[in-house]
Amino acid sequence: MELVQISLKRLRRLLQFNNLNGNFHLICLGIVLILIVILRFSWLMLGVCILYLGYLLVKSVKYMIMVIVITSFLGVNLIIRNVNYQKIDYENINLQGVVTSVKEKSKSNQVIVRSNKLKYIFYDDKKTLKIGDYIEVSGNLTQGDTNHIPLLFNYQRYLKENNIKGIIKDITYEKIKTSVTIYTAHQKVLNYFNFHFKGQTRGFLKALLIGDKTSLGEELIEEISSVGIGHLFVISGLHMNVLQKIVEKLLKYLKVPSKFHITIIIVFFLLYFMITLYLVSILRVLLIYVLSKINKKASLNLTTLDIYTISITMILIVNPYYLMNYSFILTFIISTSLVVISPHLKYKKIKGFILNNIIMSINSILVTIPIIVHINPSINTLSIIYNLFYIPFVTYILLPFSLIVTIFNFLSPVYELIVTVFSKVTSFLSVVKIGELRLSTSSEIFPIIFYSLFLIIVILFLSNSKIKKKIVAGLTMASLIFIWSNSANLNLNDQIYFLDLPVGDSTLIVKAFNSANILIDTGENINNDLDLFLKKKGIKRLDFVIISHSDSDHNGRLHALIKDFKIKNIVISSYDTITEKICQDALYNGNIIKVKKGSSITYKNINFQVLSPSKKHTSPNNDSIVMKVNIFDKTILMTGDMEKEIENELLKEYKEIVVDIYKVPHHGSYTSSTTDFLNKLNYEYAVCMNGYRNTFGFPNNKVVTRYDQSKLLVTKDYTTIIFQKKWYQKQIKFKH
């Protein structure tokens, strides 16, 4: 005890001598900036970092020295960590390890196994593995895919962010035993919930108490996110504060001596931290709690902001990869901003309480916008209002009641009724699109300007500046958000995207300044990649959606697009009744244009000349709309899934077909691309969209050999292929 008191006294003297009190947040911010540069090197972040370090140097040399020392340690730490993450092509692997995570999926469960301090991921079709199982796994280790479509999910980045070495494919595994570890304790907690509860009760209890959202269902998770209350279903400081108060009241009720309270609460946090499999939010709260007690005991005079930033920095020193995790980033930014503004919010009766909560909700939305749009570019501004009701309900009613129901499970029918009403209300609110903003992620300039303005606004509001300055600053921020939400209008180049979807075709034509957006086919209805790409491009309106034919790998996503985008015209074949039925089922209220051979459409200097079909065919593939598209002074031949019968018809009508870009028909299938047809085809580029998850082996190797290899671009090799014309160029130039 004496040693502890001496240590605290020395620490207090050191801080007072160097005058560090109230300035630790500056040091911590510098460390975070340097970490970002190390983990995600960019010249922009390097410039920001240099400017900031220069500011510290001017302010105080000792801060600079401390940052350099700590950064050196972090740099060595990261170098050591990255040794095990060299590029993996495809190598055999055999290992033994413990299952640390099992995420339930529709077809196969996602499993993470830990072996010799390294993590690996694979997919279990049998769905027999549980957390805590000790297994022997063999297979082929791969690095994962990059993003197939610009701006979307990058599997390689996901693995790095989660500190996972690679994916094991073609797996075989054998369960050796179930080891008694913290992982088995977590599984026992899951088993308890799975055995005693069902339906939405199970899903809500697991999400709110142990951070497991797998039982909520993808639809409800999406609705919760759409309403803007996703943060309430992540174990955060808010949850931990409620639990801490419950534990403190319970200890007082049981008349436990106060001298034991701190120790019991710390032990509770530690146990909870382990049972939830080391959720970083719990660790952060634990560190803040311990540092606060040390600060009070030793009279260190550390500010709340200092304590908070020190705890964050300690976590990042142990695991810098948290900086690449969106959940951590969001929690970090929201919490830090609330720590800054909270002292300036004064509660005055009910009106003041409501006003302060509105300010905090607005702050949470504004400070996270640049990060949120990278996840989902749709932001619900009505969530400010929704959170006024949801936050107190979840915090003071649903969360405490969840604890009660867990212990007294006979109350689960009442709980089920409450969460069912909760889900119904949330589902209803999720379809309200009045307050929806769509912010493009295609430009880095907006986030930079946004955070600069936001910082100015915060300074103005927290200072004694005149109300006029505050209003001007607020209006400036609102104007930026308005411009950002219409950023597609700032696209300077004409572009064509041949999208690399999992299955099927989809081609996007975008004219400069958002003057025309034309989508040809939608791909299969496997995921929402197409929708998300359009949103991240800032596209809200589609002037034309052209469906080549009725196969689901060409019209599968049409129903969803009708609900999410304003579509002025849908063009279909005169012989395509299936796609017409999809439009009716989706309650489409725009124009349906039926075309056949000889039809022509002109829009914004873009001309579509239909060459086929001229009649109804036995094969839906031959009912495909085959058309010449004249755009940017270039000609594109779109072919759908036409087969050799249609090629023969075109051969009879045309002596030679000259185009700049030729879309290889039917994904490179053997049913088309005949030698006779290709001999009469003159093209600059041939683009083959094979669908990287297709099970037909597209493109056919024999078909590939028929094309000029120097002119053939296959999405399997290139992923999404982009052609563009820059608005300032007199000579049109296409590139991929």
Image (cartoon, rainbow, N blue to C red):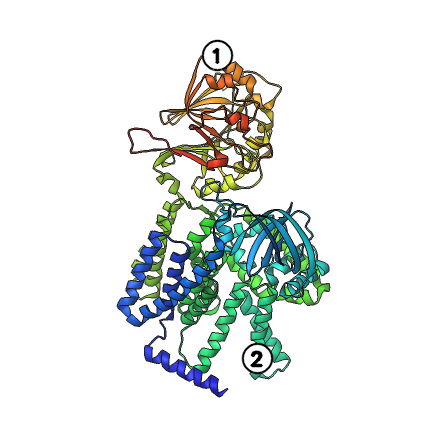
Query: Where, by quadrant of the figure, is residue 248 drawn?
Result: bottom right
Label 1 or label 2, whichever lies nearer to me, is 1
Q: Residues within 10 Å of mark 2 (few under 14, many from 20)?
A: some
What amino acid is at disc 1?
Glu
The answer to whether any part of residue 399 appears in the image is: yes
Numbered badge on residue 653: 1
Marks 1 and 2 sit apart, C-alpha to C-alpha, by 89 Å
Q: Secondary structure at mark 2?
A: helix
* Residue at the far bottom in the pictured view: 2
Identify the residue at image location x=50%, y=51%: 158
- In this picture, is 51 found above or below 379? below
- In this picture, is 650 found above or below 533? above
Q: Is residue 107 left or right of residue 435?
A: right
Residue placed under numbered mark 2 in the picture:
261
Q: Is residue 642 left or right of residue 444?
A: right
Sequence-first tag of 1 and 2: 2
Residue 254 in the image: x percent, y percent? 64, 80
* Residue at the far left in the pictured view: 58
Q: Nearer the viewer, residue 711 or 369?
A: 711
- In this picture, is 67 found above or below 566? below
Residue 299 in the image: x percent, y percent? 42, 81
